[in-house]
Structure formats: C-alpha cells, structure tokens
Image (cartoon, grey):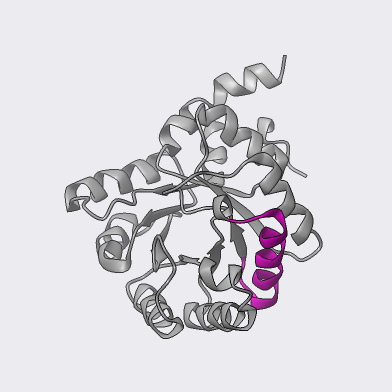
Amino acid sequence: MTDIFDLNKSEIGKYFDYSVLPKQSTEQEIRVACREAVKYNCAAFYTASPFWSPIVREELQGTSVLVATGIDFPFGVSSSRLKAIETEQAIEAGCGAVDIVMNIGALRSGNYDLVKSELRDFVKAAGGALTKVIIEVCYLSDEEIAVACKLIAESGANYAKTSTGQFEGPSMSQFLVMKETLKDTGIKLKVAGVKFPRPQNAYTFILAGAELIGTRAAPEIIDAFDQIKTIYRK
C-alpha cells in the first residue's frame, strides 16, 4: 500500500476529482477551472451535466486529466432510460468518467431490482468509461448504506461514492461501513462532501482507504499537502 506522504504535490493530485458543479457556471469559469485541474494534476474534472463536456474536452485535450460529469445530478430520480441516454450523451461528448446518482427513494423503498437494473444499464451505456455510483449516505441508515454498496458491486460499476457534495457529507463511520461492505470486491471508494476543515479531513479519508476525493476545493486541499505531511511525519 502506497504511503501518500511519500508522494509529491503533483502525484497527490491524482487522488482528487476537481468538481465545478453549479449549473449556472459560465464558460469562462469552466475553462479557468479546467486549467486549474491540469495545473494540480487532478484525476478528472467534473461538471454537473454533459452540457459543458465539449468545452472541458477542448481544455483537457492532451493532458492526463479525464473529462467527467454527473448523471441525473444531484437527485437521481429520472427514469433508468433517461439516465442511460444522458450517460450515452456524456460518452459521445468525450467523458472518460461518469458519476450517477442512485435512486435513493427506490433503494429505501426496497425496490432493489429497479436499482440494480438501472445501475447495470448505466454501466453498459458508459462503455469503457470509469463508472461511479453516488449513494448520498446522509439520507441512509448503516444498513441501507451496506445494501446500496452490495447493489453497486453486483452492477459492475468501478466506484462507490459517498455523496454528491450538494447536501450533508459523510461521516467517517459511514465511510467505514462502505469500506467493510466492499472489501474483497474490487470496488473502489470515492468520497465527496468533505467537511471543514477540508484539508485535514480529506487526507484522513485517503488514509482510511478512499481512492478518490471529489471536491470543488481540490486546489486548496492539494496546496495544503506539504503542511499536512510535516504534521504526520513529526
């Protein structure tokens, strides 16, 4: 297992998906943020819908930063068909990673077959792109979190993600339920909605096993890496 404190600031950037999610963002704001994602060597740059993906693709061309977007963001209540269509549009627009919001109402109602079918349709529509499923843990019991993670594992998605970041973020205990449920499955873990103080909390989630942090504060958190490293290395 890699000790993140053996990494440099550029290498730690790949633990972060940089997200600019408000749908009222301007083209110029999106372009500037894309350039920040490249500067900080982030894993991916996310917008709230595929609308901006062609602009993001233009800005990220020739870099290692993936074009990415949310699907049915942030509520996850569209039909499975519409979610699959939106996913296909995102892939056609150049996305290499897509995050779908699970239908939490269906999950909490016990309609597991619908949720599983929806996620499988999503993975199929995504082709070879990275697929991440958001379960919005702030609305779920620990038992529901575990069920959601099992459905993700059965769907063939690549990541289980804690939150959209638009509502209450995850606690460490909620994250650990996800980690325990998904151990030995090969499903990776992404955390979003990291609470203040963000740098300390983000690195704590990485140390606890998160492979990715999704956040609009990626530059701030990465800039704090050298300072955080000195604290842990004392």
Q: What residue is at 56 percent from the left and 77 percent from the top?
A: 119
Q: What residue is at 32 percent from the left and 48 percent from the top?
A: 34
Q: Relative to 214, is 210 on the left or the right?
A: right
Furthest residue to the front?
Answer: 109
Confirm whether the magenta stretch covers residue 155.
Answer: yes
34 in relation to 109, above or below: above
Q: Quadrant of residue 33?
A: top left
Name the main secondary structure of what is drawn in magenta.
helix
- Is 208 or 196 nearer to us in this picture? 196
**Residue 67, horizontal then vertical, whole percent:** 39, 61
Which image quarter is the N terminus in? Answer: top right
Q: Which residues are magenta?
A: 140-158
Q: Relative to 15, is 4 on the left or the right?
A: right
Q: Quadrant of residue 76?
A: bottom left
Q: Relative to 222, is 68 on the left or the right?
A: left
Q: What residue is at 58 percent from the left and 44 percent from the top?
A: 170
Which image quarter is the C terminus in? Answer: top right
- Is 181 or 4 nearer to us in this picture? 181
161 in relation to 200, above or below: below
Confirm whether the magenta stretch covers residue 127.
Answer: no
- Is 30 or 171 nearer to us in this picture? 171
**Residue 194, horizontal then vertical, whole percent:** 52, 39
**Residue 51, horizontal then vertical, whole percent:** 26, 66
